Amino acid sequence: MLLQVGGAVPTSTWEMVLTASPETQFVLAVLIVFSLVSWYLIVLKWWQFRRMRRLGDRFLSVIEQSPRLEDAYHAAMRLPSSPYNRLLREGVHFFSELKPGTLKEGAVLAPSALSTTQLEAFRMVLAKEVAAERDAAARFIPWLATFGSVSPLLGLLGTVLGVMDAFIGIATGGSGNIAAVAPGIAEALITTVAGLAVAVPSVMS
C-alpha cells in the first residue's frame, strides 16, 4: 500500500515509486536490472551484426578481385577474423586434405575432382561450420526472448501484490471511497507499465 508521508498523497509517478510498498519496489528493482541487461544486449548484438556485415562486404570484395583460389584464400586470411574467412579456411583445409596440392602454383582442378562421397563429406563439414558460426552469432539472443516473456508476467505479479496490499490497507482503515482506492491501484499499475517497457524493446529487437 502507498506510504503517505505526512498524510500527503503522491502526485507523480516518481513519488509513487519512492513511497511504494517494499514488494512493489523489489519488483521494480528486478525490472530495472532486466531493462539494463536487455539494452546492453540489444546494443551489443546491433554492433556485432553491423560489424559482421562490413566484414562480409570486404570479404566478398576480396574474393571477387582474386583470379585464383589460392590468391583468394591468402587475401581473405589477411582480413580481420570473421565467420566468412573462418568458413573459407575450414573449407579449403578440408578440400586440401581430400586433394593435396590443389592450392599450389599452376594446379588445375578437374571437373570431376571429387567423388560423390567426398562431395557429401565436404558438404557436411561446411554445414557443421555454418551451424557453429550461426550459433555463435545468436549467442545471448535467447536472453532477450526470456526478458520479453518474463517481464510482463513479473509486472503483473507486482500489480497483483500491489492491489492486494491496497485492499488490505483499505479494509484496515475502513475507508473504501475512490480517494482511498485510487493511489493504491495507481501504485500497483506501475509494475505493469515497467514490465511492458522492458518487454517491448526486447521482443522487437
Image (cartoon, rainbow, N blue to C red):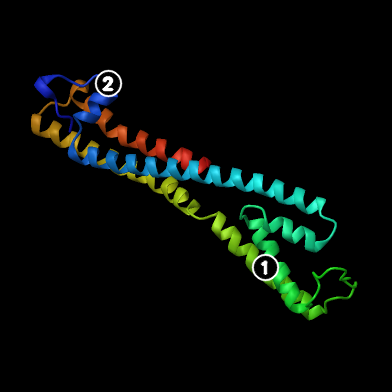
Residue 76: image location, x then y, percent: 71, 56
Furthest residue toward front: 105
Which residue is tagged 2?
12
Which residue is tagged 1?
90
Name the one closer to the observer, 179 or 79.
Answer: 79
Question: Which quadrant of the view contains residue 116?
Answer: bottom right
Q: Secondary structure at mark 2?
A: loop
Note whether residue 171 is visible.
Answer: yes
Q: Secondary structure at mark 1?
A: helix
Name which residue type carries label 2.
Ser
Quadrant containing the N terminus in the rendered view: top left
Please, is residue 98 above or below residue 64 in the view? below
Residue 150: image location, x then y, percent: 39, 48
> Left or right: where does residue 194 sit relative to residue 184?
right
Please, is residue 174 above or below residue 116 in the view? above
Residue 140: image location, x then y, percent: 47, 53
> Left or right: where does residue 201 sit relative to residue 57?
left
Name which residue type carries label 1.
Glu
Please name the residue shown 52% across and 46% down the image: 45
Residue 204: image location, x then y, percent: 52, 40
Name the one closer to the observer, 1 or 111.
Answer: 111
Please name the residue shown 78% across and 78% down the image: 100
> Left or right: where does residue 68 sit relative to residue 160?
right
Note whether residue 158 is visible.
Answer: no
Question: Which quadrant of the view contains residue 119?
Answer: bottom right
